[in-house]
Image (spheres, rainbow, N blue to C red):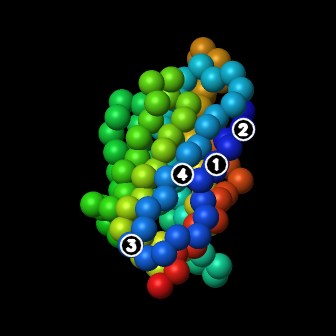
């Protein structure tokens, strides 16, 4: 299974971007999918996460500005980012837990990261 993230880029403060993350491969079950971000010298931190049951968690810093959603197949997620701020500048990574077969445990997967740069 691979996670392919896309949609990053350069945007002015106050602007919007939408990130996408699509899983490829044979997946039996999705536990959750989400987005993390990382800036140089800092740890990777949670941005938003959605479970297969639709429970959503946001970092406090993005509440009210970012919206995460998942497709019906539960293999693709989107992150709609509005009112972007310079402090949102980071590499955004897609993260997920999938079980590949019946009775298999959930394993964690990471995408390759996509750069989001917000200019002031």
Quote the CA–CA distance across marks 2 and 3. 32 Å
Q: Earlier in the sequence, mark 2 or mark 4?
A: 2
Q: Residue at x 67, y 41 (%)?
A: 3
Circle 1: is it few (<14), some (14-19), or many (20+) Cα within 10 Å? many
> Is there a contact, CB below 8 Å, between mark 1 and mark 4?
yes
Q: Which residue is mark 3?
A: 14
In the image, taking residue 7 as reference, residue 55 lies left or right, namely left
The part of the image, by quadrant, that contains residue 63 is bottom left
Left or right: 103 as drawn, with respect to 48: right
Q: Earlier in the sequence, mark 1 or mark 4?
A: 1
Mark positioned earlier in the residue sequence (1 or 3):
1
How crowded pointer 3 is (Cα within 10 Å; few <14, some 14-19, many 20+) is rated as some
Q: Secondary structure at mark 2?
A: strand
Dot 4 alpha-carbon crowd within 10 angstroms: few under 14, some 14 to 19, many 20 or more: many
Q: Residue furthest left?
A: 64
Q: Which residue is pictured at 51% across the width and 23% down the height?
A: 73
Disc 3 + disc 4, Cβ < 8 Å = no
| Circle 1 or circle 3, nearest the eye | 3
Give the SS element for disc 1: strand
Q: Nearer the viewer, residue 68 or 110?
A: 68
Compared to residue 25, the image places residue 67 above or below, namely below
Residues at marks 1 and 3, CA–CA distance in whole angstroms: 22 Å
Q: Mark 4 sits on what residue?
A: 19
Expressed as whole percent of the image width and height from the top left, the position of residue 76 reads 54, 35
Work out how far the residue at label 1 is from the one at label 4, CA to CA, in angstroms.
7 Å
Indicate which disc residue 5 carries: 1
């Amino acid at each position: 299974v691979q996670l392919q993230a896309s949609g990053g880029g350069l945007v002015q403060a106050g602007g919007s971007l939408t990130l996408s993350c699509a899983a490829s491969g044979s997946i039996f079950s999705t536990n959750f999918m989400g987005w993390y971000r990382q800036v140089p010298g800092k740890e990777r931190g949670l941005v938003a996460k959605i479970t297969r049951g639709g429970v959503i968690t946001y970092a406090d810093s993005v509440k009210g500005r970012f919206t995460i959603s998942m497709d019906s197949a539960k293999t693709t997620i989107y992150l709609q980012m509005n009112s972007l701020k310079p402090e949102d500048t980071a590499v955004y990574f897609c993260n997920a837990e999938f079980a590949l077969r019946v009775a298999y445990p959930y394993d964690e997967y990471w995408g390759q990261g996509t750069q989001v740069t917000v200019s002031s």
